[in-house]
Amino acid sequence: MIERYTLPEMGRVWSDAHKYELWCQVETLVVEAHAEAGTIPPEVVEPVRKAPPPTPEAVHEIEAVTQHDVIAFLSAWADNTEPREAARYVHFGMTSSDLLDTALALQLVEATDILLAKADTLVATLRDHALAHKATLRVGRTHGIHGEPDVWGHRVADFAFAMARSRDRLRRAREAVGVMAISGAVGTYSNIDPAVELHVARKLGLQSADVSTQVVMRDGISEWVSALAIMATVCEAVALEVRHGQRTEVRELWEPFGKGQKGSSAMPHKKNPIISERLAGMARIVRAQIVPVLEGIPLWHERDISHSSTERIALPDASIALDYMLNLTNRLMSGLVVDEARMTANLESTGGLIYTSTVLLELVEAGMSRDDEAYPLVQKAAMETWETGVPFRETLRKHAAEAGLTLDEARLDEVCRPERFVERLAPVFDRLAALA
């Protein structure tokens, strides 16, 4: 991922320097386990433990010759070991993937914990924003067209619960990727005792794979990337609502717009929804990683390397992008400007057409056939309102009179109130208030 979208904490997780630190940690634990079992001399443990991780530059210099990153790492680390003779027991009985998959599990868990903490923050931000607007009336839209009265808090509550579900899904995916294996060249423990794997897993807080070949099956990693993609897409859903709300024709919502900020090099009046648009673009990046990672599940026999290059790009990019998105979505919702007056104006802009559904039901309850009488009557009145701008109650009264029907005006006054449409939302907001 490019530096522009990489935040420091997540960037460190995927840095080469941190990766080599984890590799040293894994290899040291294997040496400890061998020493405890009497497989290797116990006096080599301390020199290995004290050897500083090699620098990325040192590893890359050797890798340019070996064309093998693990061998390059082991050689560079051996150069840092005093006495160097102790390094002969590093990687004893292991294959490269034992190291790679175990350290990768640690990176995935670390990345997940960063994401979960930010998801917690975003859930709280969405929850609090929704509760603050549980009485802010607006028009609910379907297909982009005015439907019925709603409240803004109801719309945001949907996002809050969706983000909470995404967070919980990621928690489950954390378990799926917190899996390691140290089982040798084809996973048969031919040159390493299974007790070594158990020792390392316990020390690192990981689970041993139920079975492994040379690698851990990639279904868990695929589940994890899918969970990231869903969470990113929920962020995009929030952004899409804001983008629509900031359109000139709507003007109900405004992204934070700082002093000195510019919207266009050519048009000084512009206040563009750049945060929301950026979120939409970043979500595409996260979703794009799903298929390449899924294709790492089928490998040739006990392993090929086709998944490796994919994961070196997809896993950092997906998690770094989502990390950035969670920060940005929280900033968006924390600073969102809600124009309640404009919401009211839009609610009233169609001359009462937002009440057609309740009028339809009132006519049915008064004894009219729904399909043959009530619906055609209400639709004719509504279409005339669309075409002429005459308020719906007036066109309704006209068409009702033509049909020989006298309307109960007092009853229509009662049911054609926007507040009536949201009276039953209290349990939703009670559930939302309890969301953590």
Image (tube, rainbow, N blue to C red):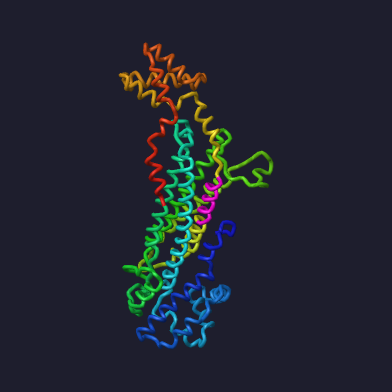
The residue that appears at 48% across and 88% down in the rendered structure is 85
Measuring from the top left, give residue 384's x and y in whole percent. 47, 19
Q: Residue at x 41, y 31 (%)?
A: 421
Q: Position of residue 145 (x, y in %)?
A: 47, 31
Magenta-drawn stretch contains 35: no
The answer to whether one can see residue 267 in this image is no
Q: How many marks?
A: 0
Task: Between residue 430 and residue 74, name the one nearer to us.
Answer: 430
Q: Main secondary structure of the magenta part?
A: helix
Can the viewer see residue 98 in this picture? yes
Against 143, residue 376 (above or below) is: above
Q: Write the residue at 34% across / 72% down.
A: 187
Residue 200: give x, y in percent of width and height: 39, 75
Displayed quadrant of residue 430: top left
Decide whether residue 328 is among the magenta residues: yes
Taking depth in this image into account, of 277 and 374 the one nearest to the observer is: 374
Residue nearer the viewer, 383 or 138: 138
Q: Relative to residue 279, is residue 27 depicted above or below? A: below
Q: Specify whether 270 is left or right of 383.
A: right
Q: Is residue 361 above or below residue 404?
A: below
> Of 268 and 302, which appears nearest the observer?
268
Residue interval drawn in magenta: 323-335
Question: In the rendering, at what x and y percent does residue 17 appear?
Answer: 54, 71
Q: Quadrant of the N terminus?
A: bottom right
